Image (cartoon, rainbow, N blue to C red):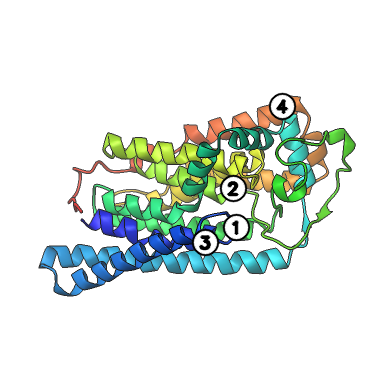
Amino acid sequence: MLSFLVGVAVLYAPVAYVGNCAPIADSMRIILGAAGLAAIFCLMTGSIWAETEKRTLARHGLLAVFGLYLAVVVSRLLLVGISAALPITFDRYLYAFDAGLGGQLSFAVGRLFSRVPLLQALCLLVYGSLTFGVLFLFANLKGTARLRWLLLANFAFIGVVGRFCYSAVPAMGPIYQFPAQFPWNPPPVLSLTLQPLLLPPGMRNAMPSLHTAWALMLFWWTYRQPQWLRVAAGLFLFLTLLATLGLGEHYLVDLVVAVPFTLASFAVFTGFLSGNRVSWVALGVGLGLSIFWFVLFRSPMRITASQPQIAWPLSVSTVVLSLLVVPWRRIPSPTSGRTTNS
C-alpha cells in the first residue's frame, strides 16, 4: 500500500514540471495532480492514526516525498540562477563532436518520434516522471532503511552538484540551437562556424545529461533486487535515454559524460552502506573522466577531438572504463540485513 501511495503522491510533481514545456492536456494535469494530493493526504493520515508499523512506514514515505520535493526545488533554483549567468553556450562544439561519432543521433531519434507518436508520448511521460521513478524505487527497495535513504541522498546530490557542472560547459541542446531544422534537417558541420553561441534565454542544462545520470543511478541501485524491479529500472533507463535525444534536449556526448559523473556519486554513497568504505578506484575514475571532458571542451583541443578517429575511442573508453569499475558488489543483498517491506 505504501508503494502505491508514494508512487501516486509524486505524480503531480512531474506533471506540474513537464506541463510548462510539453503539450500535456490540462485535464490530465488536473487528474494526476488531484491523485497526488490525495495520496499525500492518505500518507499524512496514516502517519498519525495507523498501526505502529504502518505508521512508521507512512512517515518514512511522507518524509521521502517532501524531502525529494525540496531537493527538486533547490536544484531548479540553482539551474535558473546558473543559466541566467551564462548567456554564451558551447552547443556548436557538442554538435560537432556528435558528428564525429558518425552523425546526429538526436536528430535521428527525433525523426523516429515524429514517425511513431506513441513512442514519443511514452518517452515524454518517462522523461517527466523522474521523481515518480525514484520514489517508486524508494518504496519497493528491499533491504535496510539506510539503503533507501542513501538512494534519495544520491538523487539529491546529483541534482545539486550537476547544476554546478553545467557552468563548466554551458549548452542547451540541438532543438534550441536549430529550432527550424530539428529533427529533419541536421546542418552539415562544415557549413557552421565553430564558436561559442549567444542563444536565447533558457536553461543551460545539456552537459552532462542529469536525466541520464539519475536513471542510470536508479538502475545501479537495483543490483541484487528482485528481477522485476531491475527490469523496470532498465526499461526506465532505456526510455529516458531515448527521450533525452529524441526530444532534442541533449547531444549524444552529454550522455557519455553522464556515465562517469554518475559513477563518482555512486561510489561516494555506496561507501556509506554498513560495512563499506568509499571505492576510491571508482571515485577516482568517475571524477577524473568527468573533469577530463569538461576541460576538453573548454580547451582548443575540442575541435581536434571531434575527428572520428579521436571521438570514438574517447567516448567508448569512457563508458567502458566507467562500467568496469562500478562498485556493484557494495550493494548488500536484501537478506543481509533487516528488511522493511512496504
Q: Which of marks 2 and 3 is nearer the N terminus?
A: 3
In the image, 61 versus 309, the foreground residue is 61
Identify the residue position indicated by label 3 in the image: 17
Q: Cα distance, mark 2 to mark 3? A: 17 Å
Q: Which mark is residue 209?
A: 2
What secondary structure is marked by label 4? loop
Q: On screen, 14 above or below 285?
A: below
The three-letter code of the residue at mark 2 reads: Ser
10 Å crowding of disc 1: few (<14), some (14-19), many (20+): few
Which residue is drawn at the image coordinates 56% and 34% (left, top)?
Answer: 116
Q: Residue 102 carries which label?
A: 4
Q: Quadrant of the N terminus?
A: bottom left
What secondary structure is marked by label 1? loop
Q: On screen, 253 above or below 15?
A: above
Q: Earlier in the sequence, mark 1 or mark 2?
A: 1
Which residue is drawn at the image coordinates 46% and 65% (left, top)?
Answer: 71
Residue 182 is situated, as x and y percent measured from the top left of the image, at: 72, 41
Q: Is residue 92 visible?
A: yes
Q: Cα distance, mark 1 to mark 2? A: 17 Å
Q: Are marks 4 and 2 in contact (CB under 8 Å)?
A: no
What secondary structure is marked by label 3? helix
Identify the residue position indicated by label 1 in the image: 21
